[in-house]
Amino acid sequence: MPLIIVRNDITKMNVDAIVNAANSSLLGGGGVDGAIHRAAGPGLLEECRTLGGCRTGEAKLTRGYDLPAKYVIHTVGPIWRGGGFGEEEKLISCYKNSLAIAKEKGCETVAFPLISAGVYGYPKAEALRIAEETAAKFLEENDITVYLVIFDKASFDIGLGRFSEICEYIDDRYADERAESSISQRRRYEADYAAQAQCDAVNAARPAAMPVPKPEKKRKKSIFSRKEKAEQLMAEPILMEEARDEAFGGAMPESMAGAEFPDIRKTLDDLLDESFTEMLLRKIDEKGMTDAECYKKANIDRKLFSKIRSDRLYKPSKPTVLAFAIALELSLAETRNMLMKAGFALSHASKADIIVEYFIERRNYNIFEINEALFAFDQALLGA
Ligand code: AR6
């Protein structure tokens, strides 16, 4: 199950449990602790008094009282003293112990603030990295949805530090976009919108339990013509290689150079006719991944993956396609091709697309880092 970064006040989160960044007395304080006590009402403090405090790195459970959340898990983060006093291990323990309690109580959804990243002075980017890594590790084995709730915009000041390079990259690409003819820009916007609308309509019309449709001879018309698809395939040497490898089981014999290749044409035809689901499953096999490895790396919900798997003609959303492209570590050309299968295109008119392109170009396929950047620029996250 996924890890989702959201911007919110944690006291408003409608989840099974929220985590409180408390102090060792557990008797309330400022920051998120104060906000949680105010929103939960006096019953929370009364119960906290019975707990006998909590040591740094450990966690204790109470009810949620007037909060939308059923439980509050109180944990005590380390005070930042420069990094040489075991702060990282203690912070990891906070997340691990809180998640263990959430699991024990059967929670399906749990929301964390950035523990220690306020009054306790832990550097925010580091605090976020630890939160993500620890949660992601836990999610490899457990079916819970974890929300990381970011409250203050300052933690994601995009003009500064780690996002400044992405800022420049976006600025350069937007410049490209302005140079592009308005007709081709409009064509691309329209293609994306049409595909998204079609995707929503098709998915809405198909109930979850409906049997998998038999492969049809003629599928719904794609927004791309067959000629456009073929041109795109031909423009991608990697696919030509794929086709050649599939036809010849390896390198093409030299003696056949320049000859007519009906087998290649047949394989290209097969690739053209392949649906998004078929392409996804083929790529997972080719990468030697298991389904679970792929959807977890894509930060995709297991239920969504089985829906896609059982429906040959499933129409995914654009962030879902991109999440799989990242999990499969596809190149830009392959990513474009996978998007095309679902009727989308990468566009420099979209900040989100440029950000994803930035990471793919650098072969950085860490979906959480990509989502942090998307989050910082107020864009929809991948997967989840
Ligand atoms: N929702 C989500 N996040 C919040 C909220 C909120 N309503 N309010 C603040 N944050 P802090 P700490 C973020 O200081 O560093 C208390 O007095 C905030 O922006 O609350 O672990 C305790 O009693 C920051 O990113 O907790 C302790 O004495 C993060 O929550 C001490 O502070 C944590 O900031 C604990 O310090």
Image (tube, rainbow, N blue to C red):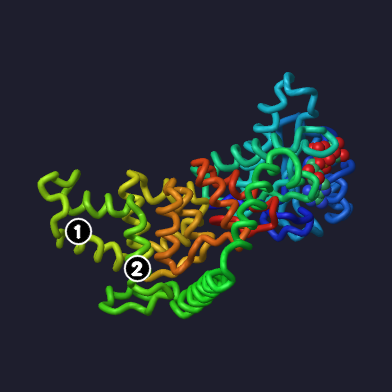
Calculate the distance from the C-alpha at mark 1 to the C-alpha at mark 2.
Answer: 24 Å
Which of marks 2 and 1 precedes in the sequence? 1
**Ligand 1 within 8 angstroms of badge 2 C-beta:** no
Q: Residue at x 33, y 71 (%)?
A: 227
For label 1, the crowd category at 10 Å Cα-Cα, with few meaning under 14, some 14 to 19 and many 20 or more, is some
Task: Return the residue nearer the eye: 7 or 169.
Answer: 169
Identify residue type, mark 2.
Answer: Arg
Q: State the quadrant of the C terminus.
A: bottom right
Q: Disc 2 on helix, strand or loop?
A: loop
With respect to residue 95, does 55 lie above or below?
Answer: above
Q: Residue at x 65, y 32 (%)?
A: 92
Q: Disc 1 on helix, strand or loop?
A: helix
Residue at numbered disc 2 = 312
Residue 307 picture quarter: bottom left
Q: Residue at x 43, y 48 (%)?
A: 331
Q: Which residue sits furthest left?
A: 255
Residue 279 picture quarter: bottom left
Residue 208 picture quarter: bottom left
User: Left or right: where does residue 43 sit relative to residue 351?
Assistant: right
Pointer 1 and pointer 2: residues touching (CB < 8 Å)? no
User: Left or right: where does residue 95 sit relative to residue 236?
Assistant: right
Task: Return the residue nearer the eye: 166 or 211.
Answer: 166
Q: Which mark is residue 132?
A: none
* Ligand 1 image position (quadrant): top right
Task: Return the residue nearer the eye: 173 or 96.
Answer: 173
Can residue 47 be spotted in the picture? Answer: no
User: Left or right: where does residue 130 sit relative to residue 337?
Assistant: right
Residue 206: % across, % down: 44, 77
For label 2, the crowd category at 10 Å Cα-Cα, with few meaning under 14, some 14 to 19 and many 20 or more, is some
Residue 211: % across, % down: 34, 74
Residue at numbered disc 1 = 264
Residue 264: % across, % down: 19, 58
